[in-house]
Image (tube, rainbow, N blue to C red):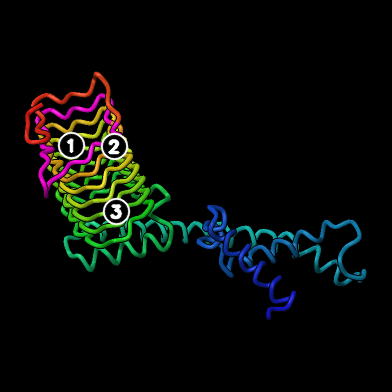
Amino acid sequence: MATDGQKQTKKLKGKWKAFLGTRFGRFLKQYIGWVDGLAIVLAFIGSLFYCKNGFLPYNEAWHQFYKDIHAELIGIGITVFIIGNANQYLQIKAEKRRLILQMGSPNNNFAIEAARQLQQRGWLIDGKTKGASLRDANLEGADLRGAHLEGADLVGAHLGRVDLEEAHLSRANLRLAYLKGSKLSKSHLDEAIMWGVNLKDAVLYDAHMEKAELWLAHLEYAELMGAHLEGADLKDAYLEGANLEDAHLEGANLRGAHMERSYILNTNLRGAIYDETTNWKDAEYNNKTI
């Protein structure tokens, strides 16, 4: 049985871990090292000269020596801190750029390792991957949860079985991208260009796809339960067997969409929300043209 001391230690460790998970905590972990600590100590020792009663018993020789060097200590501390962090910032910036470039590789192992490192260091969520050029990247099976890829170029990218839950892909170009079996629950795909995208068997629970361009998109057997497709363009999209239960289809263009119902292919529209602006013209549903 754990003692009170062990419980307290565990509690403190938990709080420290939670702190390091915050934005400020990640900043400290990333930029503050032992050199910065030494710089702060030097500057602190130098600044103690200005304490009213000093911090050591008065001695004329020591006092004169301290008087001569305190300004230098402060200057050295500040200089080391600024130069050290400036160099580290430039190194980290270059490393981020290298990993983002590597993530766009057509080599799956190479691309996945870059994505792993970016995810581990919190660099997928700091905004540096916005607008990234990942055309034809092979990221099959990658962990991209919560990634900020707004406006990214993902044309023809291989993203099968990728975990993109809560990812930000607003206005991204996913034309002809392969996302079969991927997890996109609660993701943000509003205004994304997704012409001919392959989303077969993808999980898109509560995904935000407002005004997304999904012409000829393959959504067979996709889980779109509760998905927000307001104003989305699904012209000629393939929705056989898709689950659209409770999906929001207000203002969506479903003209010519394939939603045939049969024993095997069964589009579920139970509870789907639509209005007079939803365009069903020429959509195939229940083996009939609407």
Q: Dot 1 surroundings within 10 Å: few (below 14), some, or many (20 or more)?
A: many
Q: For this rendering, which residue is in front, 197 or 85?
A: 197
Contact, mark 1 vs mark 2 (Cβ under 8 Å): yes
Q: Earlier in the sequence, mark 3 or mark 2?
A: 3
Kind of residue sitting beneath label 3: Lys
Residue 146 horizontal/vertical position (percent) = 38, 51
Give yes or no for residue 173 being in the magenta stretch: no
Residue beneath disc 1: 214
In the picture, the quarter occupied by the C terminus is top left
Taking the image as drawn, is residue 24 in sight?
yes
Which SS class for mark 1? Answer: loop
Instruction: Say which residue label 2 marks.
Output: 209
- Point out the image quarter for the N terminus: bottom right
Give the structural element (helix, strand or loop) at label 3. Answer: loop
Label 1 close to label 3 by CB (< 8 Å): no
Residue at x-position 18% and y-position 24%: 279
Question: Which mark is first along the chain, 2 or 1?
Answer: 2
Residue 62 lies in quadrant: bottom right
Assess disc 3: are there few (<14), some (14-19) or many (≥20) residues with their C-alpha within 10 Å of its C-alpha: many
Residue that label 3 marks: 183
In which quadrant of the rendered view does residue 74 lie?
bottom right
Q: Is residue 260 above or below residue 68?
A: above
Q: CA distance from mark 1 to mark 3?
A: 18 Å
Identity of the residue drawn at 36% across and 57% down = 96
- Residue 288 horizontal/vertical position (percent): 7, 31
Stretch in magenta: 249-272
